Image: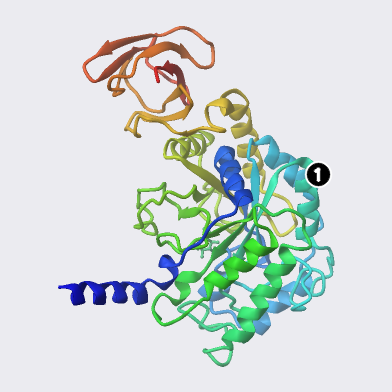
């Protein structure tokens, strides 16, 4: 029995090397996690050479484009209308508190001036401006956090080991040269965390490219240690669609709220780490000229509110155009969400998922004894709130401060509304007993 137990332990320690490693986040890191959770809303920007082909950021692999031919796009990349100050101002006005920018996506092109490859925005394009630098300077100036998306996949480099994607790009040697590629990534991460001021997070993507190759070792712990050594407050997240590994500070979900799995990428459990869900505004991450299928402002607000109710941040994506502008519809959505946030931000920022679990009618967020009931879909004037023994000391309609009736009943209270709610989100503020 004892031997069996020991061998089980041994087996577990071999099978789960990364997860069982210990990681002690620093005080700065813990503080940064809290700020991250308080901020609730960020904007994701997917921008690279792919914007020129206007068919999304996967076009290189989806169309089996030859890596040397694809690279010629760089010689024509001149986003003449790019204005970091304008981008950051529009994003800030939406109420978003951080921007996550694709420093280098799977296509392998660096949107920053790197010493470790000429295939970058300054050395390979006629534009010759370090977009990441301009964006970073503006973010710092306008007071919004900057996160970097960084791809573990590279469909361009010959030393990047080929996984299940990017196999048709014509690169020789599918095995690549891992130690050279790993060193390259760490060199670039060092640049990103040294030359652009304070960075809120590194957002990795692409781990799943090797999911059919269980022996593949991405050597994440060392990479995470490097990041935390360079900037202890910098959060590490990895869009691997798994439970977090040691060294990760946030848990990422793609296209689904934590605990839901409609898109098929989020079967993993929900951890105790700060949570973030990313979602597209239309249907694609990178710019897609034929995709005008933007979600309505109401849908976007509902997604943000539901994320907050599930204790998660929303990272909402925009794919900038090849000319350097954000699409007009995206700008409109940013402005409209911003209007809403001006009134209701207080019920979102700094909150955590409320004590009442999400229901079909909506969700709750909470700050101390204040419970915000977000009614998103209710065809009734009364609503039962399962508050158990908690007493409601005060109930008001959040926006106009009109007092509301909250009557004690079996298992909670019944809230009475003056009319069936028609707002995007009818917010009721309750003050509850300890
Ligand atoms: C997926 C895609 C990638 C995109 C990311 C955003 O992992 O591969 O193109 O950047 O999702 O969540």
Name the residue located 59 percent from the left edge and 88 percent from the top edge: 177
Where residue 296 sits in the image (x, y, percent)?
A: 51, 38
Quarter residue 128 falls in: bottom right
Quarter residue 431 falls in: top left
Name the residue located 53 percent from the left edge and 31 percent from the top edge: 348
Where residue 289 sits in the image (x, y, percent)?
A: 60, 57
Name the residue located 56 percent from the left edge and 64 percent from the top edge: 204
Q: Secondary structure at mark 1?
A: helix
Name the residue located 35 percent from the left edge and 48 percent from the top edge: 259
- Residue 205 visible at all: yes
Where residue 226 sits in the image (x, y, percent)?
A: 64, 68
Residue carrying label 1: 141
**Along the viewing direction, whichever of 339 and 309 lies nearer the viewer:** 309
Q: Is the C-beta of the residue carrying label 1 under 8 Å from the nearest atom of ligand 1?
A: no
Quarter residue 344 falls in: top right
From what the image shows, is residue 341 above or below residue 396? below
Residue projecting furthest to the left:
1
Residue projecting furthest to the front:
2
Residue projecting furthest to the bottom:
173
Task: Count residues near mark 1 (Cα–Cα under 10 Å), then give few for <14, some for 14-19, many for 20+.
Answer: few
How many discs appear? 1
Q: Is 141 positioned to the left or the right of 279 in the image?
A: right
- Residue 156 visible at all: no
From what the image shows, is residue 415 above or below residue 150? above
Q: Is 111 positioned to the left or the right of 216 in the image?
A: right
**Along the viewing direction, whichever of 85 and 51 lies nearer the viewer:** 85
From what the image shows, is residue 340 above or below residue 40? above
Where residue 96 sits in the image (x, y, percent)?
A: 63, 40
Q: Quadrant of the C terminus?
A: top left
Q: Quadrant of the N terminus?
A: bottom left
Q: How is the image coloured?
A: rainbow
From what the image shows, is residue 430 above or below residue 245? above
């Amino acid at each position: 029995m004892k031997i069996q137990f020991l061998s089980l332990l041994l087996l577990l320690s071999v099978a789960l090397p990364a997860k069982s490693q210990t990681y002690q986040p620093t005080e700065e890191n813990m503080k940064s996690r809290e700020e991250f959770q308080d901020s609730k809303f960020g904007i994701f920007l997917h921008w690279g050479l792919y914007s020129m082909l206007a068919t999304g950021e996967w076009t290189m692999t989806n169309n089996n484009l030859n890596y040397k031919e694809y690279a010629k796009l760089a010689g024509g990349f001149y986003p003449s209308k790019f204005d970091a100050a304008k981008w950051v101002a529009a994003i800030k006005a939406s109420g978003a508190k951080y921007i996550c920018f694709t420093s280098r996506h799977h296509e392998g092109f660096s949107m920053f001036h790197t010493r470790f490859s000429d295939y970058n925005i300054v050395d390979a394009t006629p534009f010759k401006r370090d977009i990441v630098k301009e964006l970073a300077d503006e973010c710092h100036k306008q007071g919004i956090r900057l996160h970097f998306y960084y791809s573990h996949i590279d469909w361009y480099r010959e030393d990047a080991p080929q996984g299940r994607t990017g196999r048709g790009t014509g690169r020789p040697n599918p095995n690549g040269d891992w130690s050279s590629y790993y060193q390259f990534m760490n060199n670039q991460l060092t640049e990103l965390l040294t030359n652009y001021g304070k960075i809120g997070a590194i957002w990795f993507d692409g781990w799943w490219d090797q999911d059919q190759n269980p022996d593949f070792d991405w050597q994440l712990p060392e990479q995470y240690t490097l990041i935390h050594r360079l900037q202890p407050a910098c959060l590490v997240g990895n869009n691997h669609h798994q439970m977090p590994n040691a060294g990760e500070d946030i848990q990422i979900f793609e296209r689904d709220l934590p605990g839901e799995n409609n898109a098929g990428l989020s079967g993993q459990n929900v951890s105790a780490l700060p949570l973030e869900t990313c979602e597209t505004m239309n249907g694609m991450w990178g710019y897609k000229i034929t995709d005008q299928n933007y979600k309505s402002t109401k849908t976007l607000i509902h997604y943000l509110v539901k994320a907050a109710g599930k204790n998660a941040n929303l990272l909402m994506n925009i794919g900038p155009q090849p000319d350097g502008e954000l699409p007009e519809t995206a700008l409109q959505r940013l402005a409209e969400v911003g209007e809403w946030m001006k009134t209701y931000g207080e019920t979102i920022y700094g909150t955590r998922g409320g004590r009442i679990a999400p229901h079909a009618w909506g969700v709750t967020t909470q700050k101390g004894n204040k419970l915000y009931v977000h009614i998103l879909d209710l065809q009734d004037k009364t609503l039962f709130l399962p508050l158990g023994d908690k007493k409601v000391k005060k109930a008001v309609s959040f926006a106009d401060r009109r007092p509301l009736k909250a009557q004690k009943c079996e298992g909670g209270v019944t809230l009475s509304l003056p009319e069936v709610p028609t707002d995007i989100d009818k917010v009721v503020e309750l003050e509850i007993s300890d």
